[in-house]
Each structure stands twice: as structure tokens, then as C-alpha cells.
Amino acid sequence: MKKRGFSLLSHRAGALFLAPAAALVGVFVLLPFFWVIFVSFTNRTLLGKTALSPDFVGLGNYFALFDPATFFTRGQFGFSLILTTQFVLLSALVGQALLGLLLAWLMQTIPPALKRIVEAAVIAAWILPEVVIGFAWFAFLDYDHGTLNAILTGLGLPRGDFLLQQPFWVIVVFNTWRGAAFSMMLFNSAFSSIPPSYFQAADV
């Protein structure tokens, strides 16, 4: 009886400990999820009359979303899907994987002291807060006072408004630079697990 009572008490104590987390998940995850689904069946907008008194439109929003005539036009779902696919392929699969592999390979060939410096510099890009990274890249690419444009001007080259003229490629390069540290650590661990005799045999 004591064991059963202790087990019941343990379940109740566990439920009490989980209750705050479950409440937060319900308020900040589940409730917005179902609210967005409900709003998708109305003509609710952020501003205007329909922001306060939306009307039920059924599947009208979904028919407009997947309309073949406008599916791939700029600002529509199809166009966003293409941009997202390009972003993932270029920054994650190609950029981060290849740059991480290159950095990990270089780690195997440089002196240990220099290796620690390079690792610290690369990992710093991964662990710094997003706000700090964002301001750093803005300062680097700013048209009027950016470091990159200062270098271009010093070399006699024209300035570039990269943030406005090439926003997609700026984000691709930024995400590649930020995520390369994780790929580097994965590849570096894989290289470290290879027996040294294999490298010695390859050198011979």
C-alpha cells in the first residue's frame, strides 16, 4: 500500500511540475496554431474594417493562394516557395556544408596554436546573439559608412548598396557564415575519428 501511495504521489508531483510548461505550450503554441487556422477561413486583415469585424469566407483564401494564374507572381506563395528552396539549397546544403568541410579539412593541416585561433573565430559567429550579428553585418554592408564600401572606395571601385540591391544574396552569405561553425565541428569530429595510420598510408 505504501508503494502504491508513493507511486500515485509521484505521478501527481510530476503532473504539477509539468503543468507550468504545458500551460506555456498551450498559450504560446497550441492557441496561436488553432487561431491561425480559424483566421485563414475569414477575410480578417491587420487594418481597416475587417480587422474588427471579419467575415467568414470559407476556402476562398486557399483558392486565391493556389490560383495558377498568380501562383508564381512576386509576393505570392509560389514565388516565396521558390525563394525558400533556393535559400536552403544555396546556404544550407551548398554553403554551410562545403564551407564547413573546407574549414574542417584546413584544421587538420594547420599548427595547433593557429587551429585554436581559427576555431574560436569561426565558433564566435555561431554563439554570438542574433542582434549583435545583425548590427555587425549592417555596419559591414552599410552604403554610407560600411566597412566593405570603405574598402571598395579605397581600391578605387564604386560603392554598392548591397542591403537594398542584393538582399537575397546578402542573407545567403550571412546564413552560410553563421552556420558554417556547426558544420565545421561535425566534419572535424569525423576527421578526428579517422585513425592516423590512414593518413600516413595516404601520404606514402
Image (cartoon, rainbow, N blue to C red):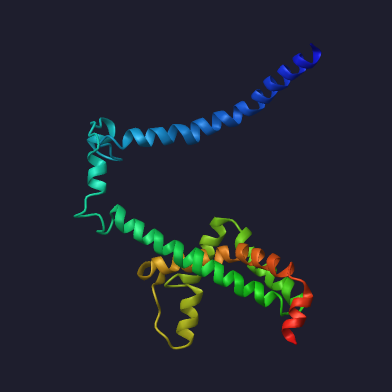
Residue 140 relative to residue 110: left or right? left
* Residue name at image x 28 percent, y 56 percent: 75
Q: Position of residue 8 (x, y in %)?
A: 71, 17
Is 88 in front, or is 126? 88
Instruction: Check the image and name the residue furthest to the top.
Output: 1
Q: Position of residue 95 (x, y in %)?
A: 51, 69
Answer above or below: position of 109 versus 129: below
Answer above or below: position of 111 versus 25: below
Indicate the quadrant containing the N terminus: top left, top right, bottom left or bottom right: top right
Q: Position of residue 181 (x, y in %)?
A: 62, 65
* Residue name at image x 22 percent, y 34 percent: 57
Is 157 in front, or is 194? 194
Indicate the quadrant containing the C terminus: top left, top right, bottom left or bottom right: bottom right
Is 138 in front, or is 12? 12
Is 97 in front, or is 116? 97
Residue 183 relative to residue 140: left or right? right
Answer above or below: position of 107 versus 43: below
Residue 101: image quadrant is: bottom right
* Residue name at image x 73 percent, y 22 percent: 10
Residue 51: image quadrant is: top left
Residue 79 relative to residue 180: left or right? left
* Residue name at image x 51 percent, y 61 percent: 134
Q: Position of residue 157 (x, y in %)?
A: 42, 86
Residue 179: image quadrant is: bottom right
Instruction: Check the image and name the residue furthest to the right.
Output: 2
Question: How many marks do you count on the picture?
Answer: 0
